[in-house]
Amino acid sequence: MSVDAIDIQRGEVDELVAVRPADVDPAEHLSFARNVFIPLTTACRYTCTYCTYFDPPGEASLLSPRDIREIVRDGADAGCTEALFTFGDDPDGRYTQIYDQLAEYGHETIHSYLAEACEIALDEGLLPHANPGDQTREQMQTVAHLNASMGVMLETTADVAAHSGKRVKTPEQRIQTIETAGELGVPFTTGILVGIGEDWRDRAESLLVIRNLHERYGHIQEVIVQPVVENERWRGGEPDLDTLRRTVAMARDALPEDVSLQVPPNLAPAGEVTDCGIDDLGGVSPVTDDHINPDYKWPALDHLETIAEEAGVPLHERLPVYERYLPDDLRDGFAGTPAGTPRTGGSWISERIRDELGADTDAGRRYRAVIADN
Ligand code: SF4
């Protein structure tokens, strides 16, 4: 970990903890993406106590290439633009069954299989956004050029008991992953998880670390403020509305304007925090469940429209990569340009993704229609 990336100035945490909803301005618009949710594998080396996503060795699943193709084809048919690949963290050696299956599909690692899965998504007309947990530089390089954007939740910089078990994920690893994405010029989504044992200073510190990483690399396209929710593994309570509103306001205050701020509408009362500065309602799927939070259904599109109407702002669809990361010829009329270092070649998107966005295909036309709508 680069220590100065998290070097927060004296007093900054105190100042941020003091921010309240009345101190920030509401956003002037709201956005959302239409996605399909693809749980590539439910194997995970970790055992976070709030998580119902992971399955233990022997029970974990790995989608086959055929499964993946069916899901993404349904998504493309339903007008989606994003293939959201979710993982646990890199499965460890206990998951022999998963590795046997990977071998059957011709792969030694989950990242090499993810690359094939991304190719399938692109082939069927969706833009991949993969969230494979902590990644080494080598792992990220295997898949970054096939993704429109990528992500991992920082969750918190605090060491909390909710990250427990024999194999514990650490804030340092996640910060390193976010930093690697910056070095590789990958538009990136991250966020904080509220209510897993962190305190107000931890929330402020987490947001300031994300801000510092964005100031260095310019690659953070959005930050999610996500409340932990009750489920069969988590009975530790949920943050109340005041806590959520105050945290969202702190995030808006801490982050530069060119970083979007999202609250997931299936996990939080998004309509109650629009005055705290959110400008995005995340990915919603007309096709698949939220496999990470299966008890919490996606809202229908007309619910998002109601949230925007009540907030008095327009709602527009976006791609999994925000327009400000697209080259000029693809983002006609967009004024903002992120600071930082774009990918090699002067673009934040790879040649492969650029080709898909510009292609004379149904998918290419669908992507460009979404861009043109903004
Ligand atoms: S939250 Fe992520 S890292 Fe933790 S157990 Fe669940 S899938 Fe694994």
Image (tube, rainbow, N blue to C red):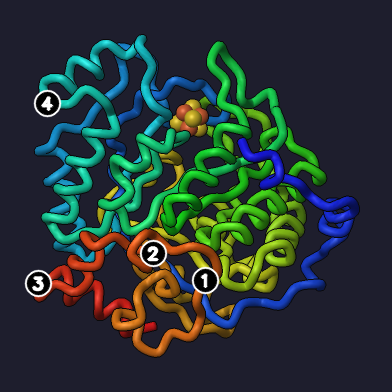
Q: Which residue is mark 4?
A: 106
User: In terms of sequence position, does the residue under pointer 3 or pointer 2 come before the other?
Assistant: 2
Q: Quadrant of residue 159?
A: top right
Q: Residue at x 79, y 40 (%)?
A: 199
Q: Residue at x 40, y 59 (%)?
A: 283
**Above or below, 36 relative to 368:** above
Q: Amino acid at mark 3?
A: Thr
Give the total of numbered labels.
4
Neighbour tally class for label 1: few under 14, some 14-19, many 20 plus, Cα within 10 Å: some
Q: Marks 4 and 1: in contact by CB < 8 Å?
A: no
Q: Is mark 3 within 8 Å of ligand 1?
A: no
Q: Which residue is mark 3?
A: 361
Say which of 56 and 156 sits in front. Answer: 156
Q: Secondary structure at mark 1?
A: loop
Q: Amino acid at mark 2?
A: Trp
Q: Residue at x 76, y 42 (%)?
A: 202
